[in-house]
Each structure stands twice: as structure tokens, then as C-alpha cells.
Amino acid sequence: MSSAVLPEEVWTARRDRHRETVADLVGPHLQRRAAGVSHPVHDFLFTYYSVRPNQLRRWHPGFGAALAGDAAADYLEYAGYTATERGVTVSPDVLEHRRATVEYVAALLSATAQRRPHLSCFGLHEWAMVYHGGDEAVRHSQVPLRLGHAGTDEVVESMSLRCTHFDAFRFFTADAAPRNEVPLSRDEQVAREQPGCLHAGMDLYKWATKLGSLVESELVIDCFRLATDARELDMKASPYDLADYGYEPVRIETPQGRADYVREQVALSERAAQLRGRLLGRCRTLLTDHAAETILAD
């Protein structure tokens, strides 16, 4: 297990930088929420990914790091922290409780990282979610479809659906699901996830937050930034007209639009690969630490 002890001036500076960063990232969302205004692009980061801004604001040093100094006593008010001779640190009980989650995340990230990126989906999952669905299937009712219902359906019928991400596929309409190149299921997620997928990159934020205080908050924020940028491409390539929100569409119904999408997709997948490697490394360290804790307990 890591024996890093963080002096008070070091960890409080990291904590304060984190709080400032989060304030900048979530401030616009909090202002809209207070005014009762929704946003079809950015609200997703706080609804689908159910991490509240206050949770994101709390800085964690990660498992194995001990906080020195009098200010560390504040962390004893948080669930999962304990006082030791080294300082205040995340309790081994937290790692024991989340061991199965760490193992699953490690398996998923490892399998994803070993595959070749697929870059031919062109973001059609959002189109498949409204295909033959009428107004009832429109997930963002405050914005219109760029091409209308008929034009949207024509785009889906003119191209192949090659979605590999179950949590996108499960929202396909009943008519769209059979058109996907491969039927997807939750049980096969580890076997199907691939690193070119925009949503696989976005979900690095989900997996980092599911590990909670076991992961240092700087990594969580890096994953959040990636999820934000990926979400923007996701929606620019969608069938929705987001001009009123300042987004020019990536017109994936055209050859140029598909080329533009792939170019941005590659850049995001390269960023995701780096973050996936960091998060996977953290998971592997946690599993090693858990094994060490088990041996010591015995």
C-alpha cells in the first residue's frame, strides 16, 4: 500500500485548486438550475451521470495517501475516512466494500484498451433513438430535429448502425434496434466495448466516480472534462438543431460531416486512451493494496 504522507500545505493547496476548478465547471449549470432553465447538452453530465455538484466539489487524495496537519480533522466528518499514525486517510473498509466494483472496472477498461478503435459509427445512436418514434421518442423536446422526422428516418435508413455501447443501444427505438449490426446486451458489455466509442470515453467519468474516495479527484476532473467535450461532439452530430445554444452541427448525413466527426472522434479517443490507462493503473494498484490488506488481516 502507498505510504505517501501529504503535508498540510501541499494537500490544502490541491484541495483549494480543485474547489476553484469545480466552481468554474459547474457554475453555469447551477445558475441555470436556479433559474429553472434546462440545457440539452450539458444537463446530461448531471442527470445521466448522477454525481451532484457538491459531491464533485469535495476533494479526495485517493486511497493510500494520508493527510497531515490539524486541518485533516475535517475529513473525519466524511464517511470512509479514518485517523492513523500517518494522518487522516481513506479507510481500508472502503476498499473492501468496493472491491467488486474495482474488479469490474479494471476488467472493462483492460478489455477496452486491448481492442482496435472502431470509427465508423458516426454518432448515429442519437438518430436511432428517434427513428420511427414520432414525437414520443424525441429526448430533447425543447429543440427541433434538424431534418424533421422523415429526414431523420431517411438518414438512419441510408447508413449502417454500428453501435457498440450498450447504454446507448438500450435507448434505440423498437424499429432501430434490429438494424444495429450486432445486438447488444449488458452481459456482453465487457466483450463489446471498444476505445473508439465516444460513450466509452465519456463513461470514464462514471467509472472514476463509482470508485469514489479511492481515486484522487484530479483524475476525476480530467475524466469530467473529457466527458464534457465528448458530449458536445455527441450532440453536434445528433439530429437536433442546437443553433440557439451556439452549436454548429456536424452533418454526419454528408461525406464531409462524417470526415469531420471521425477527426474529432480520433482526438477524443486518444485523450480517452490516456485517461483509461491512468484509471486502469489506479484500479490495479487498488487490487494489489486490497490483497496486501487481506494478507495482513490474516
Image: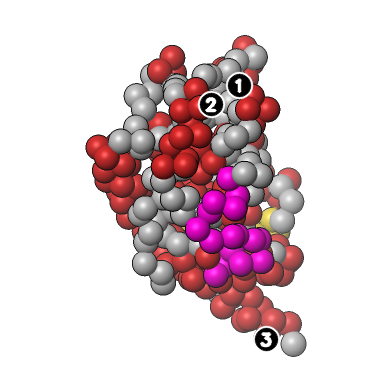
Callout 3: 10 Å neighbours few (<14), some, many (20+)? few
Q: Is residue 243 left or right of residue 83?
A: left
Amino acid type at image mark 2: His
On screen, residue 249 above or below 88: above
Region in magenta: 176-191
Kindly indicate the quadrant of the structure image that contains residue 254: top left
Badge 1 marks a residue whose secondary structure is: loop
Give the alpha-carbon distance from disc 1 to disc 2, as whole Å.
13 Å
Mark 2 Cα shell of 10 Å, populated few (<14), some (14-19), many (≥20): some
Q: Which residue is mark 3?
A: 295
> Of marks 1 and 2, which one's residue comes earlier in the chain?
1
Q: Quadrant of the C terminus?
A: bottom right
Residue type highlighted by circle 3: Ile
Residue 138 position in % (x across, y down):
61, 28
Q: Position of residue 247 (x, y in %)?
A: 38, 23
**Residue 231, image x and y in percent?**
46, 38
Mark 2, residue position:
149
Label 3, secondary structure: give it: helix
Residue depth check, mark 1 versus mark 2: number of the one nearer the observer: 2
Q: Nearer the viewer, residue 213 or 88?
A: 213
The quarter of the image holding the N terminus is bottom right
Above or below 230: residue 102: below
Which amino acid type is shown beneath numbered disc 1? Ser
Q: Earlier in the sequence, mark 1 or mark 3?
A: 1
Q: Is residue 70 visible?
A: no
Q: Are marks 1 and 3 in contact (CB under 8 Å)?
A: no
- Of residues 240 and 75, the one nearer the viewer is 240
The residue labelled by disc 1 is 141
- Element under disc 2: helix
